[in-house]
Amino acid sequence: MTGTILGRRLFPATFLSLLVGLVPLTRAEETLWLDALDLSHMRQGWGKPQVNRSIREKPLSIAGQPFKRGVGTHANSTLWIELGGGAERFLASVGVDDAAGGPASVVFKIVGDGRKLFDSGVMKPGQPAKSVDLDVRGVKLLLLSVGDAGDGVNYDHANWADARFVVSGAKPKTVPGPREDPVILTPKPGPAPRINGPKVYGARPGNPFLYRIPATGARPMTFAANLPEGLKLDPQTGIITGTTPPRGEYLVTLKATNAHGTAERPFKIVAGDLLALTPPMGWNHWYAHYNRVTDKMMREAADIMIRSGMADVGYQYVNIDDCWMNAPKYDDPLRVGPLRDAKGNIVPNKHFPDMKALCDYIHAKGLKAGIYTSPGPFTCAGFAGSYQHEEQDARQFAEWGFDFLKYDWCSYGNIVKGDQSLPTLKKPYKLMGDILKRQPRDIVYNLCQYGMGDVWEWGAEVGGHSWRTAGDLGFELDRIFDVALANAKHRAHSRPGSWNDPDYLQIGFIGDARTGGEPKPCPITPSEQYAFMSLWCLMAAPLFYSGDMSRLDDFTLNVLCNPEVIEVDQDPLGQSARVIHLDDERFLMVKDLEDGSKAVGLFNRGEMPAVVTARWSNIGVKGKQAVRDLWRQKDLGELEGQFESTVPRHGVVLVRVGKPR
């Protein structure tokens, strides 16, 4: 073959070489292994992703078939990969790892640009690997996910074996996930008064009484109430003080008036043995400030609780966590000193020069103060604990003026040398519970022992008002759905004065629980933050914000301070919602409310927006029902048969369903 260019005759070789220069050749394909990518963006329910080995750090194996390469993970797991249009195919073999050691059940799904490309169905141990061979040409964003098949994450050890991309262009790279801009759903409070907070309040006869009426609306505002003898109200601040009256129930009407109108709300004071008749609400310093906490920070938090409007929707406790005492040794010399004085009284460190003055400052704002210690000789961070000084410390806390005690297991495990029998687990908590009841002050008692011995079954018996049902939520905020669903299993033990505690609300600016680092923006999406608050309120969980109060923004306050959402948490029935699983990604939470209506959360824990349907037959209502969107504070009309809505990825739609009025 010969050719001509501009009339010149060319030999075949010359002609071909010129054609090569004019027509670019297709870039050679190459293989890029999944295990070679940055896996730091992989989120999973337990452990860390493993390269070329299972989650138990053993050779990859599925149904007896070994694999040299791949990624071992644990449900629920997600990995987002930006393909950039350069990948041709994705290939893998997927299944449950042979070393799982239990009744695992997982579902592998692959989503490309919002479209489902692969669904393995439920896979169990011993089932042969399923092959994946996908054409991903043109796909920009790929998601590899492993779900728990809707039955919990126990033993869900999953392998992306021989996982690889065939690439002819830009190389794939992992990314944190889809970006989501914050959207404020809740309208700002109007100028007219609205009284918020609980409708019922427990206090012990003869003890000091302190309650600030939570109310939104334009200030100045004046307050009035028909209080029983022994209590008085400051009409300008709305702060009720005095001494709790004799045993009995006192029906009070609270009133708030400003230039735009008057609001009223019933308020029942129950003088008796029970405190915390609704879940306590407040702030705790831990996940923001860790060992950096100071007296100044606590005072500032109290100021901001008032200034930001948090107190106006019911937040009332300002709580110190660990590191307020002295330690025998520590990096900060101002936190080192004698653990106790000559009389055995516990000594605060130099960052807390006057604990009584701190409590007085908080109380002057109508708020309450909380403190922390351990039944062991040392706290979790190595500071002085209460072991063998329980009576002395409780008396000291009451004299200082504290209204809340978090009692953290910590070094007590060393005292009992690992014994976790039920009598051993109960002993230190009953000891302190009995002591607190004898103090001339109401002190709400939080048992922080991470759910050991099924504490929800006996926490109230030892004097507790709330108890942690699991370990620290910490930096594992992508586990909020798993934590909530596990906590909701104990719903039978939720009632006035007895609350299951799934840990603190961590949104806004929070520290890094792994390092104790300075606060940074929380890693979860806006939709996840709405879901977080909704889950906690539906479960009747204590609402303790644990972010940086000095860096609250409008979006964070919007999530924390919707009074209609908070009313779900503070409902006097004290019921934790029941869960209705629709599939492995969608579920409902249904909570009966005092007025006969129901709060219903429509949740989508999947990686794509999904339509979620609440059928009246599922939630226990009939006929026409008025539906109100609680986050948007918007009536959606009277519906019959069902309510359905498109719920965003990892999001919620929260409604109240009830008979038309």
Image (cartoon, helix red, strand yellow):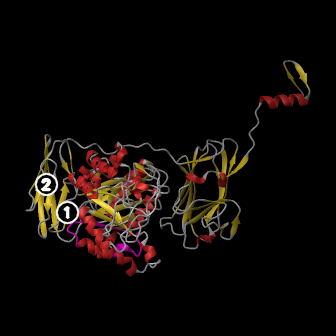
Assess whether mark 2 and mark 1 are in contact (beta carbons under 8 angstroms). Answer: no
State the mark number for residue 254: 2
Amino acid marked by disc 1? Tyr
The image quadrant that residue 367 belongs to is bottom left
**Residue 497 shows in this picture:** no
**Prevalent SS, magenta region:** loop
Can residue 201 be seen at all in this image of the molecule?
yes
94 sits left or right of 430 in the view: right
Residue at 40%, 57% (x, y): give it.
335
Q: Is residue 450 magenta?
A: yes
- Give the residues in magenta: 438-458
Residue at 57% x, 69% y is 124
Q: Is residue 168 on the magenta stretch?
A: no
Instruction: Give 30 or 331, whichever is nearer the viewer.
Output: 331
Tell me the SS state at disc 1.
strand
Q: Residues within 10 Å of mark 1 (few under 14, many from 20)?
A: many
Tell me which label, 1 or 2, sits earlier in the chain. 1
The correct choice, above or below, for 512 with respect to 47 in the image is above
Is 575 rendered above or below residue 661? below
User: Which residue is under mark 1?
Assistant: 201
Say which residue appears at 49% left-offset and 55% top-offset.
515
What amino acid is found at the position of numbered circle 2 in the picture?
A: Leu
